[in-house]
């Protein structure tokens, strides 16, 4: 596990963008596992800026997003598909047919089975992750077995509160109660993992991820068992680390 403690959100995001760009340059037909939320916003800004300035192409890239809210159409402004279109995909040359986000509507079991089959065939080269204040990755809430693949899950109250703080106009009643998420197994199957975390409220899950016990109570801790993980955090998220 490689840990980078950056001076700021901007510096951390720039560092993360270099890793993603390196991946794309090394293999222009990479399969990228992508994440939503407040954490990767700046990273995506840097990726868009790079595309405008340097033209790094996504035409052979395939993307596989981690999760989607249950019940929201991909055109809903709070859906994760919409988030990805607005913050990255509409601004680069990725092909629409190469964009994959779990469907939050329709026959959920059928959709999950299809997503799992696709992930098993395609594979993810580099998986980008945030982390929840409760230690979730994707929407795999505490208690989720490490063997799980893409599934529908009930969100914890705290997760819905966290997500209402920055999105949904602060209204928790608008935050769906469930989501469809890649499982821990899908995440662990990716070749490389790049996890980012910023702010005081990520300090405890980051402590457990870096130096705590591996347990389903803090799902991100499973990454201790992954062979190629890079963690980029700011000083606030590093504030509970005890080892140098
Ligand atoms: P955030 O969410 O980026 O909005 O903090 C991260 C997560 O829940 O994984």
Image (spheres, grey):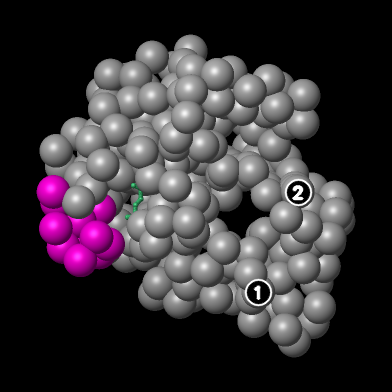
Q: CA distance from mark 2 to mark 1?
A: 16 Å
Above or below, comparing residue 81 to residue 216 in the picture: below
Outermost residue, bottom side = 53
Rendered residue at 72%/84% (across/down)? 52
The picture places residue 157, in percent across and down from the top left corner, at 14, 38
On screen, residue 177 above or below 147: below
Provide the residue designation for mark 1. 91
Disc 2: which residue: 97
- Using the rendered image of the protein, determine whether residue 73 is visible from the camera's viewpoint: yes
**Residue 72, relative to residue 20: is it above or below?**
above
Q: How many marks?
A: 2
What span is in magenta? Answer: 163-173
Q: Magenta residues: mostly which secondary structure?
A: helix
**Residue 84 percent location from the top left of the image:** 54, 59
Q: Can residue 199 be seen in this snapshot?
A: no
Precedes in sequence: disc 2 or disc 1: 1
* Res 94 quadrant in image: bottom right
Image marks 2 and 1: residues in contact by CB distance under 8 Å: no
Quadrant location, the N terminus: top right
Task: In the rendered structure, find residue 129 and report the number of the disc placed on it.
Answer: none
């Amino acid at each position: 596990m490689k840990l980078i403690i950056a001076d700021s959100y901007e510096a951390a995001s720039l560092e993360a963008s270099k890793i993603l760009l390196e991946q794309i340059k090394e293999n222009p037909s990479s399969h990228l596992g992508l994440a939503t939320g407040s954490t990767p916003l700046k990273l995506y800004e840097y990726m868009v800026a790079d595309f405008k300035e340097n033209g790094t192409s996504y035409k052979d890239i395939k993307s596989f997003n981690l999760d989607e809210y249950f019940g929201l159409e991909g055109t809903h402004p709070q859906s994760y598909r919409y988030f990805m279109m607005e913050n990255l995909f509409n601004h680069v040359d990725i092909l629409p047919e190469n964009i994959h986000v779990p469907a939050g509507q329709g026959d959920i079991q059928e959709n999950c089975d299809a997503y799992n089959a696709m992930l098993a065939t395609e594979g993810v080269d580099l998986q980008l992750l945030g982390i929840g204040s409760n230690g979730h990755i994707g929407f795999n809430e505490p208690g989720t077995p490490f063997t799980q693949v893409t599934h529908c899950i009930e969100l914890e109250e705290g997760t819905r509160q966290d997500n209402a703080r920055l999105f949904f106009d602060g209204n928790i009643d608008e935050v769906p109660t469930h989501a469809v998420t890649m499982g821990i197994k899908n995440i662990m199957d990716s070749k490389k993992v790049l996890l980012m975390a910023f702010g005081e409220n990520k300090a405890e899950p980051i402590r457990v991820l870096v130096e705590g016990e591996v347990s389903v109570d803090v799902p991100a801790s499973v990454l201790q068992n992954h062979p190629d993980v890079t963690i980029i955090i700011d000083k606030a998220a590093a504030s509970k680390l005890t080892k140098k």
